[in-house]
Amino acid sequence: MQSRLRYVVLMISISLVGALAPGQQKPADPSLPSEQTVNAFLQQMFGYDASITWKVFSIAPSEIAGLSEVHAGLSNPQGSQNLKFYVTADGMHAINGEILPFGVHPFEPARKQLEGGAKGPSRGPANAPVTLVEFSDLQCPHCKEAQPNIDKLVSEDKNVRVVFQNFPLPMHDWAAKAAAFGDCVGRSSSDAFWKFVTSVYGAQSEITASNADEKLTAFANAAGVKGADVAACAAQPETDTRVQVSQKLGQSLGVDSTPTLFINGRKVPGVGYETLQKLVDFAAKPGT
């Protein structure tokens, strides 16, 4: 996404949402801004550039009292990104930016939640002192870019175990299908799953919504599992349910873009290998 798009997203933090105009449709929950209001706000923010489009995904109460949480997607010819912001109870201000956990052990609640909920394919020692949970979208270019760092980390550091969680983004047209295929491959073989992921990332530019079934089936075969069986599994409703459970786990922890990593519960944005290694080494120390 162009830097200008990232810049205008940041400007949300100093902008007004505005009250309901006369005659404007009220939301079903009067404590939340309506979709009409949110769209009008986004029009004021981004309407100056006809190449920018958006879609409102959800408007819901935040876990933080007095704030509503809005999720939307922005796109232009250069790419797309998720947008999350909070609206104050008076409907007059939007807050952009991450709200951090606080306390002596700020990451412990997330660590415990992931310990019980992150059930995706894993690699690395089962008893490693550090668990890195990766929420990824197989159509996401940034996830592809991050994967070599994660591969290197898990191959060189025996203190870390990596768990993959599906988080297909709604603006990607074949990501959900890839997540379903990945879920089924992973249920057959964890080793095959990582081979499948590498193949999908390597062919991102060649996969389209129209050829995804064919490509993903071939990658499953190449990974060492029966592609036809994987394709049949991917089409089952229970597979979609498992992907949604993974997405909801991420959303409950504030995931709104990919890749998002958690290192023993600590939410980590995209970082280089050296920083990633330092974070893992720090988390491995007793008492941290």
Image (cartoon, rainbow, N blue to C red):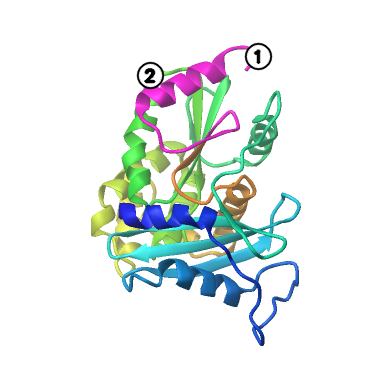
**Residue 231 appears in the picture as rendered:** no
Give percent across and percent down for residue 72.
51, 63
Q: In the image, is residue 102 part of the stretch drawn in magenta?
A: no
Q: In the image, is residue 269 part of the stretch drawn in magenta?
A: yes
- Residues in magenta, as a range: 262-288
Label 2: which residue? Answer: 156
Measured along the vertical axis of the image, is residue 228 above or below residue 149? below
Report crowding for label 1: few under 14, some 14 to 19, many 20 or more residues within 10 A (C-alpha). few
Label 1: which residue? Answer: 287
Horizontal relation, residue 44 to residue 227: left or right: right
Q: Which quarter of the figure is the N terminus placed in?
A: bottom left
| Nearest-to-viewer mark from 1 and 2 | 1
Tell me the CA gap for discs 1 and 2.
23 Å
The residue under label 1 is which amino acid type? Gly
Residue 28 occupies quadrant: bottom right
The residue under label 2 is which amino acid type? Glu
Camera-side residue of 63 and 65:
65
Which residue does the image show at 59% across and 47% down from the upper left?
A: 254
Give percent across and percent down for residue 288.
62, 17
**Residue 272 appears in the picture as rendered:** yes
Which residue does the image show at 53% across and 60% down from the upper left?
A: 15
Horizontal relation, residue 261 to residue 227: left or right: right
Residue 264 occupies quadrant: top right
Give percent across and percent down for residue 124.
47, 25
Identify the element where label 1 is drawn: loop
Give percent across and percent down for residue 117.
65, 42
Comes first in the chain, label 1 or label 2 = 2
Measured along the vertical axis of the image, is residue 212 above or below residue 194? below
